[in-house]
Every structure is written in C-alpha cells, then in structure tokens.
Amino acid sequence: MLIENKFSKYLIYAVGEIILVVIGILIALSINNWNEDRKSRKQEVKYLKNLQTDINLEIQNNDSLINYRAFTAKAAAHLLDFKTLETASDLLTLENTIQQVFQRKTFIPTNNTYKELLSSGNLNFITNDSIKDSLLELDKMYVAIHNIEYHMYREYEEYLYNVAVTNGAVINLFDFQKTAEKGTFVFKDPAQIPSDTIIPQYKRLLEKKEFINGLRLSVMNSIALKDFHGEMTGHLQKLNKLIQDDLKTN
C-alpha cells in the first residue's frame, strides 16, 4: 500500500509536471505568435501607408490626364470645324492646334508599392481581402488604359501623323536654325512664313477623309480615356477609404 501510495503521488506529480511543461510551451508559442503577428502587422501598416502615398499621387496624375484628354478632344473638334485659314496668323493658330492634338502623352501608373508586393511575394501581408481585391481591380484598369492608348496611337500614326507628313509642309511655327543654335524653341515671325504656298496644302489636308476620320477618332478616344481616368479616380478614393479604415484598427 505504501508503494502504491508513493506511485500514485509520483504519477500525479509527473502528470502535473507534464501539464506545466505543456502550458509553458503553449504560452511560449502564444507569445511567439503574438510577436510574429505584431511584426507582420507592422510590415502591413508600412505597406498600407506606402499604398496611400501612391494613391494620392495617382489621383493627382489622373486629374492631370483628365484635363489633358478633355483639352485634346476640344482641339481635335476645333480642327474638324476650322473655318478661317487665310493669313499667316491663321496658319500659326492652325499649327498650334494641330500640335495640341498631335502631342503624345501616355499614362504611367504610380504603383511602385503594388509592384513591390507582387515581385517580393508579400501580397499576403495585406490581410484585408477588400483592399487586396481593390488592388487587383486597379491593376486591371491599368491594363485597360494601356490597351486603349496603344490602339489610339496606332490610329494616330495611320490617320494623323502619316497623312499630315505626306501631304504638305508641317511645323512652320519654328525657326529651325535658331532653335538648333539656342537649344530652345524659337518661333518664326509670321512674315517669314510663305503662307501662299503652305495654306493651300493645309486646306487640302483638312479636307482629306483619312485626316477627318483620324480627328473624329481622336475626339472619341480622348473622351473615352478621360471618362476612364474619372472612374479610376473614384476607385482610388474608395481604396484609400478602405486603407484608412483598416489603419484605424492598428
């Protein structure tokens, strides 16, 4: 009985020791997991704040492109209805408007943080599924705008650039010798421009079917891109709100 009593006490003691060891391990694991979660959250917060910086810059970029596309559409529409072309001053106005349409500006996304998340495999640091889904949707918008711009500038090359270059003397605004010498754009005096020779060429250009269609396409594509950038701005604002709400839980 004494032996059995001692064994029972030993067994209870041993079980108690095991339980204490297990509890200690669980506490250690819990502390370790808490530390890891804290580190992960710290890194996530850093990414979220960097995303906010990118978003605010992207909204500014969008606003600039919205204004640019609207300006281009108006310039192209003005060329479609260009009524007076008689003097050197009219010619300079025409060429200035053409340059406004021909100017080529492409959208470059401000998405360095998102690219870093993808390239480093750290997208899983973003634990909020709504934010993650919104980022993926934003990336689709980037691809869509790139495709529209690529299609539009192919039309520019075929219907505007090539047609203009092969149907008359273009870019008569500048004194090319002085521009090259000074390294900055130098405009010609209107009296230096042989208007009698150049104006008939431009009149023919403005009546060409290819050029007219190119201008029409420019108006439509510019307005489509303007609206797309407007939609993107709305999406960016919603994404920014999601991030802001998530940061408040920190």
Image (cartoon, rainbow, N blue to C red):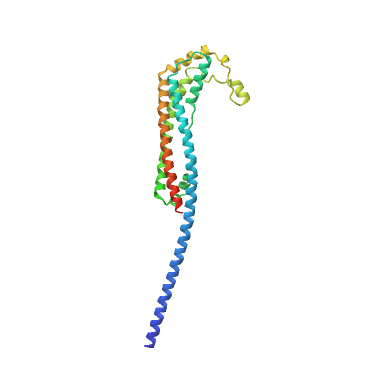
Q: Is residue 86 above or below residue 176?
A: above
* 174 and 41: which is toward the camera: 41
* Labels in figure, total: 0
* 162 and 242: which is toward the camera: 242
Q: Is residue 112 above or below residue 7?
A: above
Q: Residue furthest right?
A: 181
* 151 and 241: which is toward the camera: 241
Residue at point 42% right, 43% down?
238
Residue at point 39% right, 83% down?
7
Question: Could you tell me residue 115's position as x and y percent?
Answer: 47, 44
- The answer to which quarter of the image holds residue 219 is top left
Question: Could you tell me residue 178's position as x and y percent?
Answer: 61, 21
Q: Residue furthest bottom?
A: 1
Residue at point 39% right, 79% down?
12
Does any portion of residue 182 appear in the rendered image? yes
- The answer to which quarter of the image holds residue 239 is top left
57 left or right of 151? right
Question: Could you tell me residue 27's position as x and y percent?
Answer: 45, 67
Residue at point 47% right, 35% down?
63
Question: Could you tell me residue 64's position as x and y percent?
Answer: 48, 34
- The answer to which quarter of the image holds residue 134 is top left
Q: Is residue 167 above or below residue 232?
A: above
Does any portion of residue 111 appear in the rendered image? no
Q: Quadrant of the N terminus?
A: bottom left
